[in-house]
Amino acid sequence: MGGREMKEKALKSGNGNLFKNDVPTTGKLHLTSEAIYHIPQAMNLDRKETKIMLDEIEQVEVINFRVLKLIPITNGLQITLRDGRDLKFVVNGRKRWKKHIEEALTHRRFSDSIK
């Protein structure tokens, strides 16, 4: 992962583009029992890793959207955070990603409730 390390084992990994201001940042998406990581590819101008703690996630949705109001994106995944921010990703198998994230959220919340 380009010298960057996650402390937890990945439950699911795959290619994923994170959209910031309608600009895609290509990279890898990793789901762990604690967080979702977006690790940009080295060729991107924006190489800043994004880490979303599962505790911050309010909702996960499969979405369709348009880039620059022109280009349709039909394999979108939107993660809404508790602070109201929406993060848009383009992934393969978006329904599977949604299922895995929701399962990790359920497991995380259940684990927190019995502590």
Image (tube, helix red, strand yellow):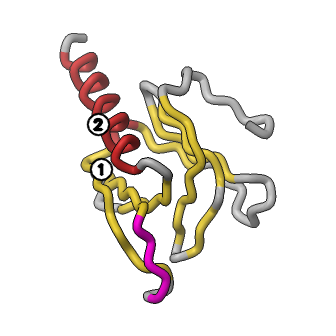
Q: Amino acid at mark 1?
A: Val
**Left or right for 77, reference 2:** left
In the rendered image, residue 20, in percent from the top left (x then y), is placed at: 53, 69
Q: CA distance from mark 1 to mark 2?
A: 7 Å
**Left or right for 51, reference 84:** right
Of all residues shown, which one is farthest toward the top? 115
Q: In the drawing, what numbered circle is on residue 60?
A: 1
> For the magenta stretch, what is the residue range?
70-74
Q: Amino acid at mark 2?
A: Glu
Q: Quadrant of the N terminus?
A: top right
- The correct choice, above or below, for 17 with respect to 103 in the image is below
Residue drawn 48% across the image and 26% down it = 11
Residue behind mark 2: 102
- The correct choice, above or below, for 65 with respect to 110 in the image is below
Q: Residues within 10 Å of mark 1 (few under 14, many from 20)?
A: some
In the rendered image, residue 16, in percent from the top left (x then y), is placed at: 56, 52
Residue drawn 47% across the image and 88% down it = 70
Q: Quadrant of the C terminus?
A: top left
Q: In the drawing, what numbered circle is on residue 101?
A: none
- Of residues 65 and 25, which is closer to you in this image? 65
Q: Earlier in the sequence, mark 1 or mark 2?
A: 1
Labels 1 & 2 near each other (Cβ < 8 A) = yes
The quadrant in which residue 80 appears is bottom left
